[in-house]
Amino acid sequence: MKSPSMLRGLLSFSSMTMVSRVLGLLRDISISHVFGANVATDAFWVAFRIPNFMRRMFAEGAFSTAFVPVFTEVKETDTHAQLKELMSRVAGTLGGVLLVVAALCVLFAPQVATVFTPGAVDEPHKFTLTVQLLRLTFPFLLFVALTALAGGALNSFHRFGWPALTPVILNLCMIAGAWWLSKRLQTPILAMGWAVLAAGLLQVLFQLPALRSLDLLVLPRWGWRHPQVQRIMRQMVPTLFGSSVSQINLLFDTVIASLLISGSQTWLSQADRFLELPLGVFGVALGTVILPSLSRHHVATDHAGFSKALDWGLRITLLIAVPAMFGLMLLAQPLVATLFQNGQFRPFDTRMTTLSVTALSFGVPAYALVKVLLPAFYARKDTRTPVRAGVAALLSNMLLNGVFLLTLYALWAPPELRAGSLLEGLSRVPGLHLALGMASAVASYINLALLWRWLRRADIYQQQPGWGRHLARLAMACAAMVALLLLGRWYWPDWTSLSVAGRVWRLALLVGAGGATYVTVLFATGLRLRDLQHE
C-alpha cells in the first residue's frame, strides 16, 4: 500500500499547529497587557514552565518517540485487537504513574518552588504565589500525557491535524483566564493557574471522538508487565533526557533567572514565544510526521527509503529555520514592540525581551534540525546516542551560562555594585538574562554537531544528490532577505516610541517584503514545488 505523502502530513500538522501558535501569541499578548512584567507574572511563568516542560517531553518528545515506533510496529504486524490491548495497557500504566507524580508534586509544591526559584525564597509574596500556582498547574501533567498517547496513536494512522489542533484549547482557556476570570478573583494571577488546569482536562476529552472513529477508545488498564509496555518504558526513560535537552536547559535558566532582576522570567518566557512558530509549526511538525515514516522504513529494512525520508526532512528544515533565524534576529524589537508593548508592558520591557529574542533566535536552526535528527535514532530504537549528545549539551549550557553571565556582569555592572555581593549585584543589573539565551543557543549547536557526527559514523544516512544547489539557493535567498530587512531597520531604527498603528503597518510591510523576497529568490534560482515533495 502506498504510504501517505509526508508533505501532506506536514501541511496538515503545520496548518493546525499554526492556528495553535497564533492563539498562543494572542495568549501571551493578553497576559502581557493584563498583568505586565512583574513579580506576579514571574511567579506564573515559573509555575507554568515546569509542567509545560513535561508537556514538551510527553507531547512532542520522549513519549511520542518511544511510543510511536512500537505502536506502528504492532499496527503493521499484529491484529487490531492486540493494538487495542496495547493502547489500554499504555494508558493505564502511564496514567497511573503520572497520577502519583502529579499528586506528589502538588503535596510538595513548596519544596519544588524552592528548587526551581531559589531567588524567590526571600520574597514571601512571590514564593507564596508560585506555590499556589504550582498546585493548580501540576495536574496538567496527567492530562497532557493521556493527550499525548491519543495523539501518538492518531499520528500513526497519519491523522496529524486533530492532535495538532488540541493545544488551541489551552490557549483559549488562558486567554479567557486573563481577560475574564482574573477580574473575578481576589488574586488575579491565579486565574491563569485555573485556566491551565481546565485546559488539561478539556484536551483529553477533545481526543476521544477521533479515537472512537479508529476503534481505539478503550478503558485504561494497568499493564506494567505487558511486554510492549516494557519496551516503550525502556526506550522512554533515556529518551526523556535525549529529546528534551533544550527544555531542561530552560529549567536551569529558570533557576538562574530567579536570581536576576524582577521581570527576567517574563522576558525569557515572552522571547520563547517567538521561537514557537518556526519550531512548533515546522520543527516539531517535521519530527512528528517523519517518525512514523522512518519507523516503517526501518521495520521493512528499507535503507534507501530511510535515507531519502531523513534527507527530505533536513532540506525542508533548513529552508524554514535559516530564514526564520535571520528574520527573528533582525526584527526582534519590531516584533516585541508591536505585539506586546501595550497596557502594563512598557518600552523597558520591550528592550529587555528583545535581548532574549535576539540571543535565542541564533539557535533556531539547531533546535529545528535536532527535532528532525532525533527520530532517525529513535526509529531504530537507539536511545543511548541522543542521551550522550544531550548530556554534553546540557553540561555545556551550564558552563556557558556561568561564563556569559559573569562576563556581562563585569561589563555592565557599575563599580559600586561589583565591589559588593555578587548575588545582590546580579539582582540589580538589567539585561543579564541575555547570557541565558546566548548559552542555550550555543549549547543547541553542540547538541546538533554531536548528533550529526554520530549519525554519519553509524552509516544509517546516505546523503542524497543536489545538496550543493540547495545550499547555494538558500544562501542567495537569505542574503537578499537580510539586505532588505537591514534597510528597513536602518530607515525605522526605534520602535518603542511609535504608535500601535504605526508599528503594525511597518512590521507587516517588513515581514511581507522580507518573506516575498526570500521566496522569489528561491524560485528564481531554480527551486520547484516538486523538490518539496516526498512520498
Image (cartoon, helix red, strand yellow):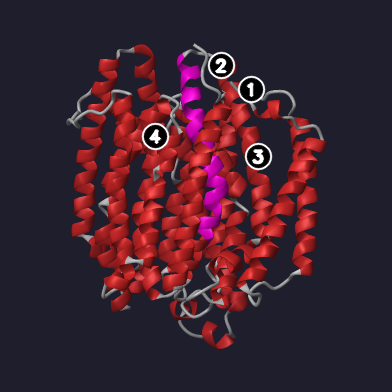
Residue 303, numbered circle: 2
Residue 318, numbered circle: 3
Q: Position of residue 491 (x, y in %)?
A: 79, 68
User: Which residue type does callout 2 highlight?
Assistant: His
At horizontal 73% and vertical 23% (from top left) the residue drawn is: 465
Q: Which residue is mark 4?
A: 64
Q: Residue 472 vs residue 391: left or right?
A: right
Q: Residue 334 vs residue 110: left or right?
A: right
Q: Where is 325 relative to 525, above or below?
A: below
Tell me the CA gap for discs 1 and 4.
25 Å
Q: Are marks 1 and 2 in contact (CB under 8 Å)?
A: yes
Residue 49: name its quadrant: bottom left
The secondary structure type at the circle numbered 3 is helix
Q: Is residue 259 visible?
A: no
Q: Main secondary structure of the magenta part?
A: helix
Q: Earlier in the sequence, mark 1 or mark 2?
A: 2
Give the label, 1 or 3, closer to the camera: 3
Q: Which residue is mark 1?
A: 462
Q: Are marks 1 and 4 in contact (CB under 8 Å)?
A: no
Q: Earlier in the sequence, mark 1 or mark 3?
A: 3
Magenta span covers which residues? Answer: 271-299
User: Which residue type does callout 1 highlight?
Assistant: Gln
Q: Position of residue 442 (x, y in %)?
A: 59, 53
Q: 527 or 16: which is nearer to us?
A: 16
